[in-house]
């Protein structure tokens, strides 16, 4: 089955690359490139009449040139928590149990083109306790036209509101169950024009899989992970991994002129869960309805998602183990996610500050197991923009939020049983320079 899907993927990629002309047939007239005077050579013979002595030469087309733009970011956190519960375990540093000033991440990336060939990549450096070094994304592609594009590599999974369903630094719970800002390895095709946003993708596996079967929780986005973790603080993965996932997203934007736009869409994904011990497979799937709009300075994002994951050959199929940032935890196999984000853009002219964007994010995860508690998150904050400097100021009040949960025995079941069901508060300021 895997060989068939890989062959099918390679076939579609080859066909797509061989048909760039047909892909642009309906994209309207193509404007000819301007030709500089020095690129046109005219030859005159002084011995002939002027009417017959001129000869035109065809303009010479230049070879494509490589264009590369470097980018990156450096970010720090100032975090304070009200519960002050020291983390458990002899290897845990409790010096910042109530908060402090810490390094968040350094990212370096590049994007560019060579003719119609395009690429985009970014590498992330996190603290060792968050997984250390890993690829955020990296793909190469072909641009058939301004509207049509194909990407091969580690790309953002076309699902839900993109690039983010939330506005805050903490993200909504859609992210922590693998349905927001997710990245996997495979092939993706996009059509974005005339109000339409249509994307389809096939992913062979998540982004951190290697030829030596290494696929642990050291990654940026959340997936079902087969290894890593363990002990009473982290969930012990059960050798289950994601494979052969199909994604489709269709959205349409209604243009309201100077007022803004309303974009409505649907998303779906379906793939396999592979038991690497028994080689058995079962299926996982997710569906979403989403709406986002911009009306003057007001911005709204609404999304409902439903996900079902069926881990094969396990004793307890009520949960799977997902992981990122080197910290796997259990996630209910069947759950619904309600997500919303409201924000307002306020132009500012105060020194380097150009805009302040207050926002309110809300999300909730409900589970099919009756006695498992919901995950609820309220995030009130604002984003301050000043040139390359972006500062997120967040007050997170939540139950079972992985980034607002004591790193103790309750962490492993945060998105499954969520046994303690306690409200907790965290105040965070993220200071980032983007270049």
Image (cartoon, grey):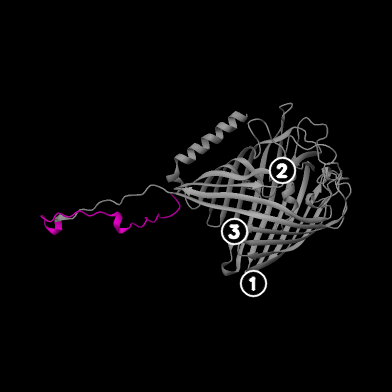
SS at mark 3 in the image:
strand
The quadrant where residue 428 appears: bottom right
- Choose the circle earlier in sequence order: 2 or 1: 2
Which class describes the residues within 10 Å of circle 3: few (<14), some (14-19), or many (20+)?
some
Tell me if 90 is positioned left or right of 15 in this view: right
Magenta part of the chain: 25-51
Q: Position of residue 107 (x, y in %)?
A: 63, 50
| Secondary structure at numbered mark 2 | loop
- Which quadrant does the C terminus fall into? bottom right
Task: For marks 3 and 2, give the one nearer the viewer.
Answer: 2
Q: Which residue is mark 2?
A: 131
**Residue tagged by mark 3?**
253
Residue 310 rendering spot, x and y as whole percentages: 75, 36
Looking at the image, tell me whether mark 1 or mark 3 is earlier in sequence order.
3
Query: Is label 2 or label 1 in front?
Result: 2
User: Residue beneath label 1, please?
Assistant: 348
Task: Tell me the distance, in whole angstroms, between the alpha carbons under discs 2 and 1.
Answer: 38 Å
SS state under label 1: strand
Question: x and y percent of residue 232 in the render?
Answer: 85, 39
Q: Quadrant of residue 189?
A: top right
Q: Residues within 10 Å of mark 1 (few under 14, many from 20)?
A: some
- Residue at the extreme top: 278
User: On the rendered image, what quadrant is the N terminus found in?
Assistant: top right
Of the numbered discs 3 and 2, the one sitting upstream in the chain is 2
User: Which-is-in-front pick, marks 1 and 3?
Assistant: 1
* Residue 13: numbered disc: none
Give yes or no for residue 37 being in the magenta stretch.
Answer: yes
| Mark 1 → mark 3, Cα distance in angstroms | 28 Å
Q: Is residue 153 above or below residue 358?
A: above
């Amino acid at each position: 089955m895997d060989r068939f899907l890989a062959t099918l993927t390679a076939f579609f990629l080859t066909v797509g690359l061989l048909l760039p002309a047909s892909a642009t047939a309906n994209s309207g007239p193509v404007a000819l490139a301007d030709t500089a005077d020095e690129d046109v050579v005219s030859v005159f013979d002084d011995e002939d009449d002027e009417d017959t002595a001129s000869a035109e030469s065809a303009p010479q087309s230049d070879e494509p040139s490589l264009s590369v733009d470097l980018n990156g970011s450096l970010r720090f956190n100032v975090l304070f928590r009200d519960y002050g519960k020291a983390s458990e375990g002899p290897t845990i540093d409790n010096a910042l149990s109530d908060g402090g000033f810490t390094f968040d991440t350094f990212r370096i990336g590049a994007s560019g083109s060579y003719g119609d060939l395009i690429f985009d990549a970014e590498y992330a450096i996190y603290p060792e306790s968050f997984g250390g070094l890993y690829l955020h994304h990296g793909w190469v592609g072909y641009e058939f036209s301004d509207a049509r594009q194909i990407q091969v590599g580690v790309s953002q999974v076309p699902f839900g509101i993109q690039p983010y369903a939330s506005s805050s630094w903490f993200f909504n719970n859609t992210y922590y169950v693998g349905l927001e800002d997710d990245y996997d390895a495979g092939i993706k095709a996009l059509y974005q024009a005339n109000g339409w946003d249509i994307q389809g993708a096939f992913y062979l596996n998540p982004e951190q899989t290697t030829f030596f079967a290494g696929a642990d929780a050291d990654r940026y986005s959340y997936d079902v992970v087969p290894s890593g973790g363990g002990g009473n603080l982290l969930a012990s993965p059960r050798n289950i991994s994601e494979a052969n996932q199909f994604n489709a997203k269709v959205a349409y934007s209604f243009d309201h002129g100077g007022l803004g736009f309303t974009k409505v869409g649907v998303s779906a994904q379906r793939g396999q869960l592979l038991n690497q011990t028994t080689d058995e497979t079962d299926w996982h799937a997710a569906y979403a309805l989403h709406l986002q709009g911009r009306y003057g300075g007001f911005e709204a994002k609404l999304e409902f998602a439903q996900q079902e994951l069926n881990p094969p050959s396990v004793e307890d199929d009520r949960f799977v183990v997902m992981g990122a940032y080197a910290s796997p935890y259990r996630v209910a196999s069947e759950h619904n996610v309600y997500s919303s984000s409201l924000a307002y853009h306020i132009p500012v002219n105060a020194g380097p500050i150009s805009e302040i964007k207050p926002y309110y994010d809300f999300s909730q995860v409900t589970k099919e197991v009756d006695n498992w508690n919901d995950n609820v998150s309220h995030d009130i904050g604002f984003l301050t923009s000043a040139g390359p400097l972006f500062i997120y100021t967040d007050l997170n009040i939540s139950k079972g939020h992985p980034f607002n949960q004591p790193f103790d025995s309750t962490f492993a079941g945060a998105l499954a049983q969520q046994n303690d069901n306690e409200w907790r508060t965290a105040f965070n300021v993220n200071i980032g320079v983007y270049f």
